[in-house]
């Protein structure tokens, strides 16, 4: 009888994935100021004057927060920021965003699944690493 | 009188399918089998089997800690194709016929598109081993930020292959039992630097409980009954004699030789199988 050693599940600490965030905007005179961070690592910081795709690689940890902070909306002007699409590792997160993202308005209200950011505030999406496992756990209703 | 039947040399490359290999199949279908082979058990056994060839020098496996079960190398590259789309990857000219049958054509070395993943077969059938341009391919991929995914289906029939897999552009590779005339099972492994979401990951990690245990039990049985280097260990002398008799140049593949006259590769798998070592 051949004996086998059972392979243990391996936690891969260095999971580096490609992020792609597509934003667009509509404003009268003043463009929104946008800061994109993951786990407090700033990936974009500037005015968004037109449709733009921000791409970066990031090494995930076990707990992760993606933040899109949008500011600089004058009270007397119309100014919108739209999250058109976000993908991680080539996977479009539309469904996850609708269920898990939170947009905290400057006035304290929180809206789940918002992608039309018409007020100043901070949008965030929390997720775990490894990302592939988090997606499976989420689809199974386990997170 | 000729020792070997020249009529058994083929233009098409044909696997060696001898009595021993046929017997393994017969035994699997007719004898009671061990069926409690879990995925973890299978992976440990298969990893050891595929990685430990005594006649090849392949290094760098330790850079690929993520190992998944695949149904043949076709599933290995189809999973990549599904992820990146039909226009989202590139191949080299004269690669596996699958691509050209599906209308995908190769990009010349030196003209590879930056940032677009490259799928390639290595060892490469018509090169008779590694592609001779392999160092240039690596250099170009490094300069153009191209991820490489290697279909290593032919490794199980190879010898004297020296390959360092640690190059950072190499992101994954796959091997299977298919080319040892085990196309009736095709099970194998994919090695990756990190787990990514794709159809093989879903196949291995999303579905719970006993996925493909039949194929894994069968693969385990094959590997318990077949030496990793069976092809060359069995047919090395015969390969040498056939090449001498017909003025063929040996390749790294036991069942493939190259005509010195035309420079083309020819199949000697059928001739090897028909001329069993004991008959020589």
Image (cartoon, rainbow, N blue to C red):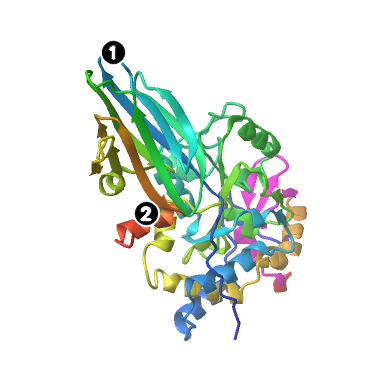
Residue farthest along the top direction in this orientation:
A29
Q: Secondary structure at mark 1?
A: loop
Q: Secondary structure at mark 2?
A: helix
Q: Nearer the viewer, mark 1 or mark 2?
A: 1
Q: Which residue is mark 2?
A: A135
Horizontally, residue B123 falls left or right of residue A12, namely right
The residue that appears at 47% across and 81% down in the rendered structure is B36
On residue B164, which mark appears?
Answer: none
- N-term-proximal mark, 1 vs 2: 1
| Residue B137: quadrant of the picture | top right
Q: CA distance from mark 1 to mark 2?
A: 40 Å
The percent coordinates of residue A136 (x first, y second) are 36, 58
Residue farthest along the front direction in this orientation:
A107
Disc tally is 2
Question: In what quadrant of the picture does the C terminus of chain B appear?
Answer: bottom right
The residues colored magenta run B248-277
Q: Tell me which chain the residue with mark 1 is part of.
A: A
Question: Mark 1: few, some, or many residues within 10 Å (few <14, many ≥20)?
Answer: few
Please name whichever residue, B274 or A108, is drawn nearer the observer in this view of the structure: A108
The percent coordinates of residue A90 (x first, y second) are 41, 41
| Residue B29: quadrant of the picture | bottom left
Horizontally, residue B210 falls left or right of residue B225, namely left
On residue A29, which mark appears?
Answer: 1
Q: Tell me which chain the residue with mark 2 is part of.
A: A
Question: Mark 2: few, some, or many residues within 10 Å (few <14, many ≥20)?
Answer: many
Residue B97: say if magenta.
Answer: no
């Amino acid at each position: 009888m051949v004996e086998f050693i059972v392979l243990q599940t391996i936690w891969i600490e260095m999971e580096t994935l490609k992020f792609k965030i597509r934003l667009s905007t509509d404003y009268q005179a003043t463009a929104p100021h946008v800061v994109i961070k993951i786990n407090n690592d700033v990936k974009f910081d500037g005015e968004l004057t037109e449709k733009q795709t921000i791409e970066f690689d990031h090494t995930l940890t076990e707990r992760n927060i993606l933040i899109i902070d949008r500011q600089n909306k004058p009270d007397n002007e119309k100014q919108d920021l739209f999250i058109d699409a976000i993908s991680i590792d080539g996977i479009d997160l539309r469904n996850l965003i609708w269920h898990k993202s939170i947009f905290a308005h400057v006035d304290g209200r929180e809206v789940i699944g918002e992608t039309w950011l018409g007020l100043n505030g901070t949008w965030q999406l929390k997720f775990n690493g490894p990302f592939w496992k988090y997606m499976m756990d989420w689809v199974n209703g386990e997170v | 009188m000729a020792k070997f039947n020249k009529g058994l040399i083929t233009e098409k490359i044909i696997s060696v399918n001898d009595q021993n290999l046929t017997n393994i199949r017969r035994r699997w279908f007719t004898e009671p089998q061990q069926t409690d082979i879990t995925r973890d058990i299978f992976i440990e056994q298969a990893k050891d089997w595929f990685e430990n060839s005594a006649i090849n020098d392949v290094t760098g496996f330790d850079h690929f800690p993520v190992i998944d079960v695949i149904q043949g190398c076709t599933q290995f590259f189809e999973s990549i194709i599904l992820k990146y789309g039909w226009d989202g990857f590139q191949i080299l000219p004269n690669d596996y016929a699958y691509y050209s049958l599906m209308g995908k054509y190769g990009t010349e070395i030196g003209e590879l598109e930056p940032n677009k993943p490259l799928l390639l077969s290595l060892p490469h059938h018509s090169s008779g081993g590694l592609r001779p341009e392999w160092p240039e391919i690596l250099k170009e991929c490094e300069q153009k930020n191209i991820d490489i995914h290697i279909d290593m289906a032919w490794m199980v029939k190879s010898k004297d292959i020296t390959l360092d897999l640690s190059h950072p552009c190499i992101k994954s590779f796959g091997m299977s039992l298919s080319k040892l005339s085990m196309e009736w099972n095709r099970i194998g492994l994919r090695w990756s630097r990190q787990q990514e979401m794709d159809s093989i990951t879903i196949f291995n990690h999303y579905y719970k409980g006993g996925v493909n245990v039949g194929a894994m039990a069968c693969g385990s049985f094959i590997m318990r009954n077949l030496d990793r280097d069976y092809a060359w260990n069995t047919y090395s002398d015969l390969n040498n004699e056939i090449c001498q008799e017909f003025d063929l140049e040996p390749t790294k593949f036991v069942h493939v030789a190259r005509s010195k006259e035309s420079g083309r590769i020819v199949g000697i798998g059928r001739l090897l199988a028909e001329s069993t070592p004991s008959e020589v």
